[in-house]
Image: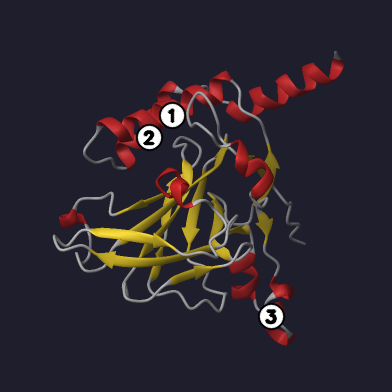
Amino acid sequence: MIINHVVKKTVGYIKALGMPILQNTEWYEMLGYDVEKMEPKDFLKGKSLICPAIQSMFKNLYIIRSPFNIHLKHHFLPDGSSTVQILQDSSFKPEKFNELFAINNILPHERNDPKKPILQFALPCAFLTDDDVIMEVLPPMLEYQKLPGLVSGGIINIQYWHRTVNWFFEWSEPDKEINIKRGDALFYLRFLPKDRDDTVILKKINQNDDINKSFKACYFSIQNLKSINDSLMSLNKINKPKYLMKTHFKIIKSLLKL
């Protein structure tokens, strides 16, 4: 008889990564949604719920929701550059746009098409783990959204590369408006342990000195390099403490004993 033992991998979740790495992220603690586990029964019915492929897809799958109403209109300037108009039913102040979003902050030759602007929304939430776990950022493929473009994804190993997550959007129909309601899905996160049978447990954690140091190393590496690849990312594995998560939980336990 084969007995399958469930192995759980803990992923730490910082809802609003703040100082000394990022500034003015406290708003997300109140306005931002917590990361939610996605369940097949919320999207599917009938026999599809017992399909192994469906079960595998939903395993360790989470959703990030928009903290704002976002209603934007794009305009090309005479020199071909972009400007974004914040429409009235957006729930954030127009003067805060440049603190939250970036339009075309990558070089023109790195874009698929200069006529398709790139919009990014930087969220302050971040993830890390002591185990070998890949984090995938995925478009919200199970949502009926009518967005004028494509939500792009990405993949990083969160054992050694630590950063906040971004909503990355190619505005392929810039003559059409972006209209996202607060609570709408921005993107999905899927956590892939080295052993795909393992289950990921997400635990909300706070920052400490070791965690801050690792995030700063990754953040300033990106700022100082023209490009970065997995080999360069893995260098942080050498510099950071082996057990960031275990160190965090030891600190919490010691505080509870006081």
Quarter of the image with the C terminus is: top right
Q: Nearer the viewer, mark 2 or mark 3?
A: 3
| Residue of label 1 | 237
Quarter of the image with the N terminus is: bottom right
Real-space Cα separation, disc 3 to disc 1, in angstroms: 40 Å
Q: Nearer the viewer, mark 3 or mark 1?
A: 3
Mark 3: give few (<14), some (14-19) or many (20+) Cα within 10 Å: few
Residue 53 left/right relative to 97: right
Residue 184 in the image: state x and y as whole percent.
60, 66
| Residue 242 in view here | no
Residue 122 left/right relative to 233: right
| Residue of label 3 | 44
| Residue 214 in view here | yes
Q: Are marks 2 and 3 in contact (CB under 8 Å)?
A: no
| Residue of label 2 | 234
Residue 251 in the image: state x and y as whole percent.
71, 19
Q: Amino acid at mark 3?
A: Leu
Give the secondary structure at mark 2: loop
Residue 114 in the image: state x and y as whole percent.
19, 64
Q: Are marks 2 and 1 in contact (CB under 8 Å)?
A: yes
Q: Quadrant of residue 116?
A: bottom left
Residue 46 drawn above or below residue 42: below
Most distant residue in the front direction: 88
Q: Earlier in the sequence, mark 2 or mark 3?
A: 3
Residue 99 drawn above or below residue 146: above
